[in-house]
Amino acid sequence: MINGVKIKKLKVISDERGRLMEMLRADDEIFLKFGQVYLTTAYPGAVKAWHYHKKQVDHFVVIKGVMKVVLYDGREGSPTYKEINEFFMGDHNPILLQIPPLVFHGFKCISEREAMVINCPTEVYSYQDPDEYRVEPHRGEIPYDWSRKDG
């Protein structure tokens, strides 16, 4: 796994009324600090990639549908430089994925319906000076093919 990436298995508590799933708690070992919470979605087959942050740590939880979340370590000097990780998150795999600064990330909705991601980053979004740096998903600057892998 890419250096600095952490996973927290999430526990779903169900009863006849519904279910509850805690995502991130201030007393979790994985917790760093609170910036904000937001929801982002993707439609079936849509790719939202690539970007990274210089300061912000992301905490992704897919709450509906299934996402293929992909990370790429472009940090020269990292012990996992140029490593790629794929995580299949959502309905069948409830996890929280902690993504450190400078690690490229993106996702693709692989479910038959819109997928929803809750992110709890460590920083608030600055509209005047966003901590977000982008690379086009299909141009090949990052050696990853977003197409479905059958077989």
Image (cartoon, helix red, strand yellow):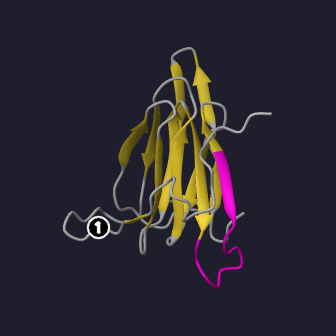
Residue 143 forms part of the magenta stretch: no
**Is residue 23 visible in this depiction of the protein?**
no
In the displayed structure image, the side of residue 50 where residue 85 appears, left or right = right
Q: Is residue 121 above or below residue 54?
A: above
The answer to whether residue 101 is seen in the rendering is yes
User: Please, is residue 104 above or below residue 79 in the view?
Assistant: above
User: Which residue bears the numbered disc 1?
Assistant: 130
The residue located at (60%, 24%) in the rendering is: 14
Residue 138 vs residue 76: left or right? left
Looking at the picture, how far across and down is residue 42, in whole percent? 44, 37
**Residues in magenta, as a range:** 74-87
| SS for callout 1 | loop
Image quadrant in which the N terminus is located: bottom right
Circle 1: residue type: Pro
Measuring from the top left, give residue 27's x and y in whole percent: 53, 59
Q: Residue at x 47, y 53 (%)?
A: 49
What residue is shown at x 54% (from left), y 26% (from top)? 19
> Magenta stretch: dominant SS?
loop
Query: In the rendered view of the protein, which quadrant contains the C terminus?
Result: top right
Could you classify mark 1 by the number of other residues whose Cα lies within 10 Å: few (under 14), some (14-19), or many (20 or more)?
few
The residue lying furthest to the bottom in this view is: 77
Residue 93, image x, y percentages: 66, 37
Residue at (65%, 48%) from the top-left corner? 87
